[in-house]
Amino acid sequence: VVGLQTDKPLKRAFMPFGGIKMAEQACTTNGYEPDPELHKIFNEYTTTHNQGVFDAYTPEMKAVRHNHIITGLPDTYGRGRIVG
């Protein structure tokens, strides 16, 4: 375990799986410009957990959820949220 997640101690790593927007913001905050190709990959070819859940919903399910007719669908419980 050299730098825990990098090859050198105290070296910052680009970790877009925690959120591409947050990773890009961390780069710009520290004076680096993130690679536009990484932005393209994480916005066009991968999906977040929430995108995957909502992609599985039918239009009817989305409408019912939007109008608060039914609550407690998996997207509200997926990350330990308290619904009540």
Image: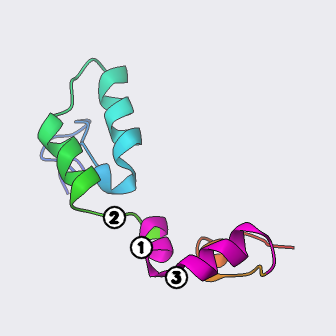
Residue 42 position in % (x across, y down): 25, 53
Q: CA distance from mark 3 to mark 1?
A: 12 Å
Q: Are marks 3 and 1 in contact (CB under 8 Å)?
A: no
Q: Earlier in the sequence, mark 1 or mark 2?
A: 2
Amino acid type of the residue tagged 2 in the rendering: Thr
Where does label 2 land, which residue?
Answer: 47
Where does label 3 land, which residue?
Answer: 58
Amino acid type of the residue tagged 1 in the rendering: Gly
Q: Which structural element holds mark 3?
A: loop
Residue at x 66%, y 77% (from the top left corner)? 77
Q: Which structural element holds mark 1?
A: helix
Q: Looking at the magenta stretch, what is its main secondary structure? A: helix
Q: CA distance from mark 3 to mark 2?
A: 18 Å
Q: Are marks 3 and 2 in contact (CB under 8 Å)?
A: no
13 or 73: which is nearer to us? 73
* 32 relative to 65, above or below: above
Image label count: 3
Coloring scheme used:
rainbow
Residue range of the region highlighted in magenta in the rendering: 50-69
Q: Are marks 1 and 2 in contact (CB under 8 Å)?
A: yes
- Residue 5 magenta-highlighted: no
Q: Which structural element holds mark 2?
A: loop
Find the residue positioned furthest to the top: 31
* 27 relative to 62, above or below: above
Where does label 1 land, which residue?
Answer: 52
Residue 57 position in % (x across, y down): 52, 80
Q: CA distance from mark 1 to mark 2?
A: 6 Å
Q: Closer to the camera: disc 3 or disc 2?
A: 3
Residue 60 position in % (x across, y down): 61, 81
Amino acid type of the residue tagged 3 in the rendering: Thr
Q: Earlier in the sequence, mark 3 or mark 2?
A: 2
